[in-house]
Amino acid sequence: MAKRDRVLMVHKYFTTSNSAIYRNTDLEQWFDAKVIAPIVGELSEFQECDMGSSYIELPQQIKAKHACINVNNNDQACFAWALTSAMYPIFPITLKQIPNVQKQNNLSINVYILEKRGSGFVTLPTYLTNNKKDRHINLLLIQSRYGDVDYEPLRYHYVWIKDLSRLLSSQLGKHKTKKHFCDRCLHYFSSMERLSKHYEDCKNVNDCKVRLPNEEQKSLKFKNFKNKEKVPFVVYADLERVLKQYQHHLPAAVGYYGKCSYDPSLSFYRSYWGDDCMSWFAREMNQFAENVETVFLSPFDIKLTPTQEADFNRATHCHICEQPFEPDDVKVRDHNHLIPGNNYRGAAHNSCNINYKDGVVVPVIFHNLSGYDANFILENIANDMPGRVDLLPITKENIPISDEDYQHAKNVWAAFNIKNLGEYTDLYMKTDILLLVDVFERLRHSSHMTYNLDPTHYYTLQVTPGIVCCLKHVKL
């Protein structure tokens, strides 16, 4: 790209929209229509332009404090410029990557945000370091707009806070005396000595400032309307182990049932036995996650019948929040993006529709997770699968083998013409998994029919769904 007397080398990308591929899809025809044609069209219309800047002006009220250094950058590296203004250059970063930045550069970082309160702003912490260093930097993460109704995308910008006390003092009154603020809880003290004593306790207790609810926030309300929809995909799994030697068990077989809530033909059962069964299971879960991601990346357009269109025009209440449409509300047509036909769900507020999304988390429900099997899951799954693995025990199993159990096993062996222990293990494990599927799916169906909620959205089945159901049905 030529710019004045310089030639700038930049990467440009062409993207195409997602489109599903089915078993009967003609791949050559699909590739020509969905890839080649759009890219050729974009090439013919392409015009070079500058990358633009992430720079945002500070709100005038904050700017007048002269407490922040806001670098007027002409690129997307506002985080780097904010830190550069304090110390030295560093790569652009996100909040989740800040711990790595701190570790690699032997520094500590706190990040604060602005919250609109009436005609002014209140400064609040959004990220606090766990280990404050001598080299410490406070950053302010500002937005391109605050609470405005605007269809422009929301942009963020990092600013170096060179004087936290000056930035926060006006939130407490018009007194101009110097205040020493705790950068964790934002309480203030008259001297550094008092602040130092407080900080020793604060760093072990407070992750952020305590904020009491105001009059509008004092009541709990049911807000997670998306939990009314069934989780699209759930995995039910179990494993079996063998005793290699005294008190030394090893996983021998693992199986799982992938349940699709909206299309039974997509549900399936798979199993594997061998010394590497847990590694096999990890690979299967990774592949399953990729397949599910492909489904979410290929949404279907809405298809309404004349009757459904008439129902939409007559609708007076949002089918999501169940509240009436006000004259100024935007009424939209909500549909299931995963189903190709008959996918209209009802009329909805525009804001409700935007937040009414299918969950992207696939719950994996293990039989006997709180028992001995959890050792193998922790050791193998956590090592073989990338990212964080969260485990939640649900059931317990500790049943000794009796003479009746042994006789029953012999009867099963004969009835199913089992030839070896491997076949018996497969049958036993498959039965366990399918029973788990049957019981849990009945729970989901019953909960959905009674409360219009899917319990697989919640991590605990004893307390959380009960509280949520109460909030939902008493309209709090």
Image (cartoon, rainbow, N blue to C red):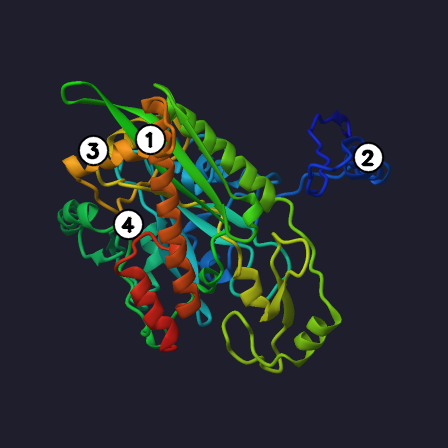
Is residue 244 visible in the rendered structure shown here? yes
Residue shown at 60% from the left, 76% from the top: 329
Could you tell me the amino acid type at mark 2? Gln
Question: In 3D space, how far apart are the residues under numbered discs 2 and 4 (Cα atoms)?
Answer: 60 Å
Asked where in the image residue 83 lies, by quadrant, the reply is: top left
Nearer-N-terminus badge (4/3): 4
Q: Secondary structure at mark 1?
A: helix
- Amino acid type shown at disc 4: Asp
Q: Is residue 86 visible?
A: no
The picture places residue 198, in percent across and down from the top left corner, at 15, 50
Q: Residues within 10 Å of mark 3 (few under 14, many from 20)?
A: few
Mark with earlier residue (4, 1) = 4
Disc 4 and disc 1: Cα gap in Å? 72 Å
Q: CA distance from mark 2 to mark 3?
A: 60 Å
Between marks 4 and 3, how big is the CA–CA gap? 66 Å
Above or below 215: residue 435 = above
Q: Please provide percent x and percent y for residue 94.
A: 46, 40
**What residue is pinned by disc 1?**
414
Circle nearer the viewer, 4 or 3? 3
Say left or right for 400 vs 78. left
User: Please, what is the three-letter code of the amino acid marked with disc 3?
Assistant: Tyr
Nearest to the observer: residue 163 or residue 125:
125
Q: Earlier along the polypeptide chain: callout 2 or callout 4?
A: 2
Q: Which one is closest to the eye, mark 3 or mark 1?
A: 1
In the rendered structure, find residue 183 and report the number of the disc placed on it. Answer: 4
Q: Answer left or right for 175 relative to 307.
A: left
The residue labelled by disc 2 is 29
Asked if the residues shown at circle 3 and circle 1 are in contact, with their CB atoms under 8 angstroms apart, the answer is: no
Q: Which residue is at a point 32% across and 30% down the rendered structure image? A: 413
Q: Which mark is residue 406?
A: 3
